Amino acid sequence: MKKDIKNLNLDELKEYFSTINEPAYRANELFHAIYREKKESFHDITTLPKPLRKTLTNTFYIYAFRLVSKYESKDGSIKYLFQLPDKSLVETVFMHESNQYGKMRNTLCISSSIGCPLRCKFCATGQMGLIRNLATGEIIEQFLQIDKITKINNVVFMGMGEPLLNYESVKKAIEIISDKNGRALGKRKIVISTAGIPGKIYQLTDQISSIRLAISLHAGEQRKRDFLMPGLKEHPLTELRKAINYYTRKTGNTITIEYLLLKEINDTISDVQSLVDFLKRLKFVKVNLIRYNPVPHVKFKVSKKENMFLRSLQKNGVRATLRKSKGPDISAACGQLATKSRK
Ligand code: SF4
């Protein structure tokens, strides 16, 4: 059976080439052709000799996804649903949005697994449970499929799955996408959005410190967080706080705290106070309040108190902004399309 060439980083490609008596520089040429020139077939990589192209064609593939559907939102975001060779479905969302300086940028929201074991109560992906983690090549292919149409400036691991529970594959995908011999997307342009796995935050801080981090908090009080995110009970907020502190102190990067506002669940003035208490004495943090994108068969509703919540945080000296959910008209909350299609 053919293998996915995108599972190999440059060193591994060189190692493979040495086993077939090819010089290491051929690996650089191949890497450049796949990631920079977006070649879709080994036959088209004319910098490589013909016999080598034939060997590669017989051993590996470059692309394997089939586009099942594509939904365009009025706000410009596009949601892609891909089918993988084993018939699993994965979602990838493209967003064209302005940054804090008003400059337009192309951001791609990537999935790291099919389903998710954490089962957060408000999340469509969580309702599936974990089906399987994605391999490095499958994470990269989401990026390449869109990058070959429109140049991507930023990547956010905020699609289906908890990226830190598929740590090695995600880390390797980041190394390959950011490798200067290939696509060379700066690590600072990549954000990992995590529900908060303290041990993995320490590991990531030590191993890929330039990466940016966002934490999905959604409650500053332990009991409420346990209710909303039951899969994280074994990682208490006190431990998460220490890990955030470690990351911000060691990297000097600002961390984003994501807070999904849910009507009468986590949007009261006492919830503001719990969040302020959690953030006390933490340096380099900002809060992103997110408007809820309703999920079918999930009982939560959109909060009407977002302005009150925002102002109260700001009065308490917290840097905070309100972010509208992207693509409410195309089922953009992660996992919604895949769940629908599976059904
Ligand atoms: S919100 Fe994220 S961590 Fe929670 S179930 Fe959904 S994908 Fe998993």
Image: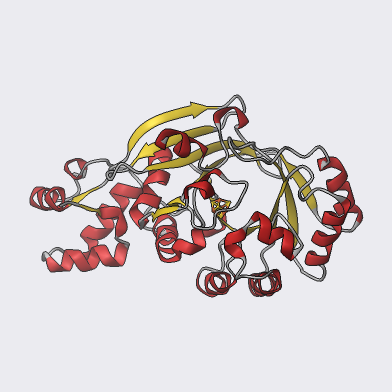
| Quadrant for the C terminus in the image | top left
Number of numbered tags placed on the structure image: 0
Image-based side of 194 in relation to 301, left or right? left
Location of residue 21 in the rendering, given as x and y in whole percent from the top left corner? 11, 66
Location of residue 84 in the rendering, given as x and y in whole percent from the top left corner? 32, 43
Q: Quadrant of residue 142?
A: top left
Image-based side of 179 in relation to 262, left or right? left
Q: Residue at x 18, y 44 (%)?
A: 46
Location of residue 240 with respect to 219 vertically, above or below: below
Q: Quadrant of residue 256?
A: bottom right
Image-based side of 130 in relation to 65, left or right? right
Image-based side of 109 in relation to 219, left or right? left
Q: Residue at x 36, y 50 (%)?
A: 138
How is this picture coloured?
A: secondary structure
Q: In the image shown, does 86 or 156 lie closer to the viewer?
A: 86
Task: Tell me if I can see residue 136 in this picture.
Answer: yes
Q: In the image shown, does 200 or 270 lie closer to the viewer?
A: 270
Location of residue 277 with respect to 307 vertically, above or below: below
Location of residue 54 in the rendering, given as x and y in whole percent from the top left corner? 10, 48
